[in-house]
Amino acid sequence: MDNLAPRILDLMARLSGREGPEPASPPPLNRAAIETAYRQALRRWFELTAQGQDAEGEEVARAYQEILRLMDEVGEPRATTLRREWAQEWWRETGACPFCGERGAYHDPDRGGEPSNA
Ligand SMILES: [Zn+2]
């Protein structure tokens, strides 16, 4: 019996992914950092959207890739929940639609792009 405890601990360490592939959901500290990065990437995206034709193509592509990567890391459905929350926050702060850059309206993607008061 005395030898069992260390073996169980060892097994648990293996199962928790320390010696295997990355666990499916990141540990809490990591998660907070990922969500902060996701928020920054989205806000950058809304900024580029507001610039419209003036936005630099390469930067738009880079920001887009970054968002896709972070969405993957955050995971659904949370990635979508956060995106909606931050899109509305952006709109309240800047008065510009986060999806097309137009000033005034918020084209809610959950209502087929119809303007809403969010
Ligand atoms: Zn819009």
Image (cartoon, grey):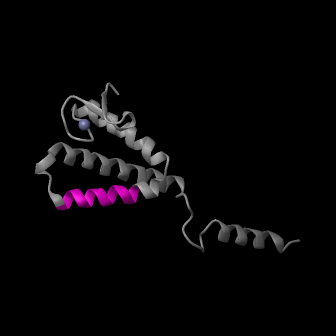
Give residue 100's position: percent from left, percent from top. 23, 41
Q: Is residue 23 magenta?
A: no
Q: In the image, is residue 17 above or below residue 69?
A: below
Residue 18: quadrant of the picture: bottom right
Of helix, strand and loop, which mostly describes the magenta segment? helix
Residue pictured at 46% horizontal, 53% vertical: 74
Apparent side of residue 8 relative to residue 49 in the rendered image (left or right): right
Vertical placement of residue 55 versus 98, above or below: below
Q: Position of residue 33 (x, y in %)?
A: 42, 53
Q: Residue 69: image x %, image y %?
A: 38, 60
For image coordinates 18% across by 62% down, the residue present is 58
Q: In the displayed structure, does residue 51 sit left or right of residue 22?
A: left
Residue at screen point 24% across, 60% down: 61
Viewport quadrant of the N terminus = bottom right
The quadrant where ligand 1 appears is top left
The stretch in magenta equals 58-70
Q: How many labels were placed on the picture? A: 0
- Residue 72 on image: x %, y %: 44, 58
- Relative to 60, say whether 5 is above or below: below
